[in-house]
Image (cartoon, rainbow, N blue to C red):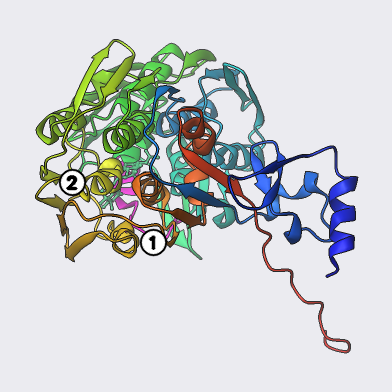
Amino acid sequence: MKTSSKRRAIRSAAAPAVTQFPGSFPLIKRGHATYWPDLLDDHDSIASLDENLMDKFIIRGGNPLVGTIRVSGAKNAALPAMAASILTEEPVILENIPDVRDIRTERSLLQSMGAEVELAYGGDVHRTSLCCRNLSNPEAAYDLVKTMRASTLVLGPLIARTGRARVSLPGGCAIGARPIDLHIKGLERLGAKITQEHGYIEASAERLHGGQITFDKITVTGTEDLMMAAALADGETVMENCAREPEVSDLASLLNKMGAHITGAGTSTIKIRGVKKLGGAHHRIIPDRIEAGTFIIAASLTGGDLTVADCDPSHLGALFNKLQECGVAFSFNADSVSITNGHTLKAADISTEEYPGFPTDMQAQYMALATQAEGSTVVTENIFENRFMHAQELVRMGANIRVEGRRAVVRGRTPLSAAAVQCSDLRASASLVIAALVAEGETVLDRVYHIDRGYERIEEKLRAVGAQIERIGELFPKKSPSPVGVA
Ligand code: UD1
């Protein structure tokens, strides 16, 4: 590919801004992304690049985080809330929807079923309006489910509303097996007939009826899926051993606005009195406690004075308890947390548990913190069997971590140095970003599409409070044309 033709392609695109990353190469900025000019060719207009990108972050460590950083709406509350729109013909309007990839995947999923979905992002307004009056195709295809496990949240609402559902089995994922047997068992208790064929679950029911469900294991999306199904069932459902996560309570609050009768969400026992029909509603999604916790850990590690705003500190109790043990100084009010500089970090063990215990979704970020604490930290992962992928990457950056089954022992205070590292899943990526913020030199973080699934423009948010972090885009390798004469 000749350089001149690449430059032509850049010039023909709509006035991109050229910027210079400190001390290195010229980059082209467009929207939220920055592109390497040399990777463009004749066929690429910058406007059409987004679908082709394998973005990376370049992070230069050493800056404290100072100022105010704002938390977006909770992805894990927004996903079930969007699925809940299936339960009614009327429009459901959701505010505070995060601008992340998983939300766009859910939009595609709902649209593929016949739903009308509008996403509006801009300024402080992050809103989606969903209308499922025409659900012509009650199916969640493998292509979408494999990219986002939470797609299985449509199973319960589809059976309850349309009497049938065809949903691909999600298969394994980077952090473990993650079956959905408890969703299936629960739906059978409510009268659904379920078979499995060709990698799909086929479910049907004339009409669901209430029932007694005791979860063998606490499951967040399982609790949500069945709560939605039971909301439109005949009679009362009592669910025991439910997940108590704030996202479950947020969904119950939306469903009640739609006309459901749900009590006990946020406790282990949830009671649902089914209704014949649900209506539209307007609802604001709760703040993302995991994003908030990620910024709180980043500030605790890098020093500086950071206020994490628009969050709900009451959802972060387990993290606060640990940070107190670590010697981090912080204060909070109703919707923000401030972390102040000047503490020496001390090691404190964690063991992940269901809410209100220490969240598995914060384990990786906490491990990055532990690498700089005085003493050894034992990290025990109780929720997923294979959630230490970040440990190997942290070791490549100089951390001393020994993984033994579900436990990892982190010996602290090892200086971190920049390296080329790779994201393996959403929260592992956040852990590597945090580590890179205190590593010496320039870390290149590959496969940041994982982080884009659940963090809204994390690089812009961090840069605004002093971090040196840039996104660069790289094109997937182009496919060679088929050799002549070969079909
Ligand atoms: C949700 C969150 C995810 C978080 C996880 C645990 C969303 C969209 N995702 O995932 O970010 O990491 O909770 O807090 O809210 N299990 C079964 N059978 C089932 C269902 C689950 O054995 O039918 C097991 C899982 O393998 C896992 C445990 O139960 O070991 C908890 O999983 P679950 O709470 O269901 O996680 P998700 O809801 O998928």
Residue 479 versus residue 34: which sits nearer the camera? Answer: 34
Residue 17 in the figure: left or right of residue 466: right
Q: Name the residue rendered at 28%, 56% in the picture.
A: 387
In this view of the protein, which residue sits in the foreground, 65 or 379?
65
Q: Earlier in the sequence, mark 1 or mark 2?
A: 1
> Residue 74: x, y in percent?
42, 28
Q: Nearer the viewer, residue 130 or 262?
A: 130
Looking at the image, residue 481 sits to the left or right of residue 302; the answer is: right
Q: Is residue 171 magenta?
A: yes
Tell me the element at label 2: loop
Report the residue marked by disc 2: 216
| Residue 71 image point, x, y percent | 43, 24
Q: Which residues are magenta?
A: 169-190
Q: Quadrant of residue 20?
A: top right
* Mark 2 Cα shell of 10 Å, populated few (<14), some (14-19), many (≥20): few
The type of residue carrying mark 2 is Asp
User: Percent from the top left, x then y, of residue 138?
Assistant: 58, 42
Give the side of residue 168 with respect to residue 20, left or right: left
State the residue lying farthest toward the bottom. Answer: 485
Q: Quadrant of residue 232?
A: top left
Residue at numbered disc 1: 172
Q: Residue at x 69, y 48 (%)?
A: 27
As drawn, the label of residue 156 is none
